Amino acid sequence: MSYTENNRERLDAFFSQYEGAGLKAVFDIGTKAGRILIAPKATPSREGWNASSFYNDGQAFFLGKDVNPYFRTIDVEESEAFRKVLQFMKDYKTLLLEKGVGPEDITAVGTAVFRWMVNRDQVVKKIETETGVKMLVIDEEKESLISMYSIVYTYNFSMSEKLGARKFEADDAILLIDQGGGSTEVSYFFPTNINKFGVSSIDECGTVALQKLFYTVNSDDLESRTAPEVNYTAIPRQFDRMERFVDQIIDQWEGYPELAQKNIIAYAMGSAFSASLPRPPWSESNPKRKRNNFTQHNMGLSKTRIMELVQEFHDKIDDNLEEVCDLYNLLERNDNSITRKMESELTVSYGLPVYLKLMEKFNLRDISFAGFGLRYGIYIYDNVFKGALDDLLVEDLKMDEEEKESIAWERIRKYNTAAAYEAYLDKYPEGAFSFIAQINLEKIKK
C-alpha cells in the first residue's frame, strides 16, 4: 500500500465526520511529489475552514528525475517513480470508491513534469487506464490563475490573527509570487474583473536553480563552472554574487506596467518564504505541534524583516564556514541534524532575496503567505466559482510558436552545451535557428 496505517486511520476518522455528506477529491501530481486533497462539497466558510475540514496526504516520488533529459520522455514500463505514482492514485481511488465518493467527483491534474514530456499523451493514457482517473495536464498560466481563485476565497481567513471583514475594491490587484525549484512565477489577477490577469516566469530564480549557481564560480558558462568541492570562493563574496545575479535577472524583467496606480495585495508561495514566517503564539506552549498551511495562511513579512532575515542567515553560515567548498563538503556528509538545519537556512538564503527584489520592483512594504495553492484552487474554482477546468481559457497569455522558439533559443545560446543544442534540434528540427544550432553542436563535439 502506498499509504501508512496512520493515514488510513486519519482517513477513516475524516470520513466518519462527513458520513452521508458529499465529498470531492483532487490529485495533484508534480515534479517532486504527488498529493491528494479530499474536501466536502459544501465548501467550508471562514469559521469552518481549518485542517480538520479536509484530508491531505502527499508523498515524494521525484517523477522529474526519471524524465530522460535528452529525449524528454519517461519510460512508463521501467520508471520506478511512475510506478509509485500509479500505486498512490490506485490505492486512494479504491478507498474513495469504498467510502462512496463517485468517479465524477475525483479530479487529477499534472503540472510541470508533464509539460516537459514529449510522450505526455502516452503517460496520461497509462494513468487513466491503470487508475480509472482522468488526468488533465495544465499549463503554467492556468496553474497560476487557479491558485489565484483560492486566494480570492480565503482572503479573509486566518488562524493566527483576527482579520476584520474585507471586500475587494475596483483598484485592487492580487499579486502572487510563487517560487519553485527552477523558476519564480509572478502573476496578477483583478478580483473584481476576473477576465484580466497575467502570468510571467522568471527563469533561474527558483531555489534549486539558485542552489546550483551558489556552488559555482562562473554563472554564465555552464561548461566552465568549478566543481563545488574545490570552489574556494569566500562565502560572503558568494552571497554578494548571488544577490547581484538576482538583481540583474529581475531588473531585466519588464514587470507589469498595468499595475501602476493599483492597490497591490501581495501574496507569496514557496518553501523559502514559509520557513521564514514567525511561529504562531500556540507554539510556545506546544512546540512539537507542526506549522501548517492553515496556521500560516495570511501571515506576513515586511520588507524590513525580510532584509533582517537574509542578513541573519548569511551571518550564521559566514560565522561557521569560510569557503564554498567547506559548506558543500559538510552538507554532502549529511550526518547530523546540524547539516539539515543549515540546508534549510541556505534555502531561505537563496530564496528570500528574490522576494525582496520583487518587492522593490513593485514598491511593496509587506507580503502575505498564501497557504492554499493549486489543489485548493481547483476545489474552489469548481465548487465556489462553478467553473470547469477544461473550459478555463487563458488565450490572452498564449505566445505563438515563433515567440516560444525565440525564447528557447536564447536559453540554448546561454548554456552553449552539446546537450542544449541537441534539445533544441529535437524540438525544432526545422526551426529558424536549426542551421546554426547544428554548426555549434558539431564544433563542440570536435
Image: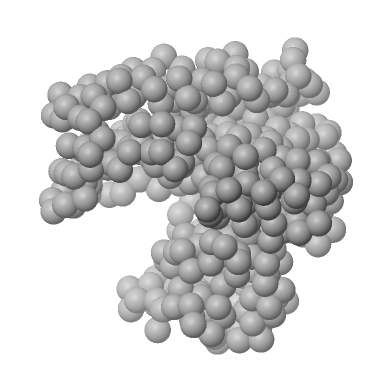
Q: Quadrant of residue 10?
A: bottom left
| Residue 424 in the image, given as x and y percentages of width and height | 67, 53
At x 80%, y 32%, the residue is 192
Q: Quadrant of residue 391?
A: bottom right
| Residue 328 in the image, given as x and y percentages of width and height | 23, 42
Q: Can residue 114 be seen in the rendering of this structure?
A: no
Q: Is residue 389 above or below residue 17?
A: above
Total marks in image: 0
Residue 427 located left or right of residue 295: right
Residue 276 located left or right of residue 90: left
| Residue 306 in the image, given as x and y percentages of width and height | 40, 22
> Camera-side residue: 116 or 68?
68
Q: Can residue 190 be seen in the rendering of this structure?
A: yes
At x 46%, y 41%, the residue is 222
| Residue 25 in the image, given as x and y percentages of width and height | 60, 69
On-image quarter of the N terminus: bottom left
At x 76%, y 46%, the residue is 433
> Camera-side residue: 369 or 184?
184
